[in-house]
Image (cartoon, helix red, strand yellow):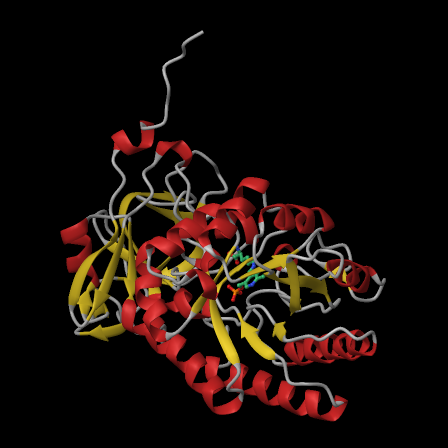
Amino acid sequence: MEFGHTKIKKHRLTVGGCDCKALAEQFGTPLYVFDVEYAESIAKAYVEVLKREYPDFTVCYASKAFCCTGIYEILAPLGLGADVVSGGELYTALLGGMSADKIYFHGNNKTGKEIKYAIESGVGCFVVDSPRELDLISRYAKNPQNVMVRVNPGVEAHTHRFIQTTLVDSKFGFSISDGSAEQIIKSIAEYKNLHFCGIACHIGSQIFEKQPFEIAIDKTTDFIVKLNSLGIDVERLDLGGGFGIKYADGDMPLTPEAYMSNTAKYLKKTVKEKGIAAPRLIVEPGRSIVGEAGVTLYTVGAIKTIENVKTYAAVDGGMFDNPRVALYDARYTAVVADKADEQAAAKYSIAGKCCESGDVLIDGIDLPALESGDVIAVMSTGAYHYSMASNYNRNAVPPVVAVKNGKACYMVKPQTYEDIVRNDSKLDF
Ligand code: LLP
């Protein structure tokens, strides 16, 4: 099984040169492990392809996939910018060393407080998603503030329904087809301290094909032709993120190189054919940079066999560290950390420890015979895991340990029970 940079050495799973069973012993479980070199290699691949194929570009890491200061320490030096969608992500990105001018602020309902904070921080560009937002940005902007407009090109990417964002009934963006995108863009000229610099779209997530991106390019460039005919320049085109990764057998994503070079070449060809000025290309990969860099380690506790039905192996994590199964029916695969390539002996359902029947991380996986105390590694958990974790049932959010060249250190420290109650307040009527 090939996932990110995990390797199997003498039956033992290693990541970033560290033995997973040993990491579990040293740091405890549940534990998120993050392979720094893997994330770096994907980020560099995007940058290298674009340097070659489309030199006017910015790769903005989509913070929502995995947000903590360490990720910006890794990605900012590689020249990446960041997409943020909240004041909290912005604060984290700045603290992690991301320069404000390389930050794009997205979101369908940015609050006035967030907009003020972003302007005071010198954020590079807002991706506007409502007319109200223009008023708010204009209220706080001193110098002309760059704004892009989120458009809905109406492309349907083949992913889970809940993850699609560009269906006609999407809460995101202004539709190109019904004229609302054109209308809001025209209205920007009325704000003297706003500068319209381009359009943005995001057609979905965990996409395995090239075609949806090509269709998005067709539709957005048609729209650019239209805007140009109205005398409106479009300096930047943001195609969002969405490149898929491998979670389990049967997932066959393209490499980041393949996605990116196809997108870049297709855009180059299309702008030439349509006779429009080549816009700066912004891409916002999130999952594909960090997803396969992550592995979650759990310790098996209770094992419960229901005769002729199934055997549950319960682990010390669950939907509080991985809500994706309950939310999206996401599929995962796992190995036993020190029996990683051993023959399977039985089928298990890997259950979480939350008080919900639906808290099952993998419903049926063939594994070597499990015993309490075994460490299980669930693969491809670097994206939308830590960032979507909660304290449900007052479980602590697991720490994140970064691994590189056989060394390991905290990227996010463990939460204590004190941390969990830190903001609980004594009633004082
Ligand atoms: N740019 C925009 C405007 C987005 O809305 C998103 C993701 C991205 C970039 C990054 O997309 P990526 O490259 O990561 O696919 N929680 C869900 C995923 C939601 C994605 C929302 N937007 C999950 O766990 O699958």
The residue closer to the viewer here, 42 or 304, is 42
Q: Quadrant of ligand 1?
A: bottom right
How far across and how far down the image is residue 55, in percent? 50, 86
User: How far across and how far down the image is residue 243, in percent?
Assistant: 53, 72
Q: Kindly give the residue lying farthest to the right in the view shown.
A: 178
**Residue, far top:** 429
- Residue 222 at x, y percent in the picture: 78, 79
Q: Nearer the viewer, residue 261 or 31?
A: 261
Q: Quadrant of the N terminus?
A: bottom left
Q: Is residue 361 visible?
A: no
Quadrant containing the C terminus is: top left
Residue occupying image coordinates x 37% and y 23% = 424
The x, y position of residue 184, in whole percent, is 77, 58
Residue name at image x 75 percent, y 61 percent: 189
Please tell me whether residue 375 is drawn above or below residue 302 in the rendered image.
below
Is 381 situated left or right of 15 in this image? right
Judge left or right: residue 67 versus residue 55.
left
Which is more toward the observer, 408 or 7? 408
Q: Does residue 324 appear to the left or right of 139 in the view shown?
A: left
Q: How many marks?
A: 0
Q: Is residue 202 visible?
A: yes
**Image-based side of 306 in relation to 276, left or right:** left
Q: Is residue 319 above or below residue 277?
A: above
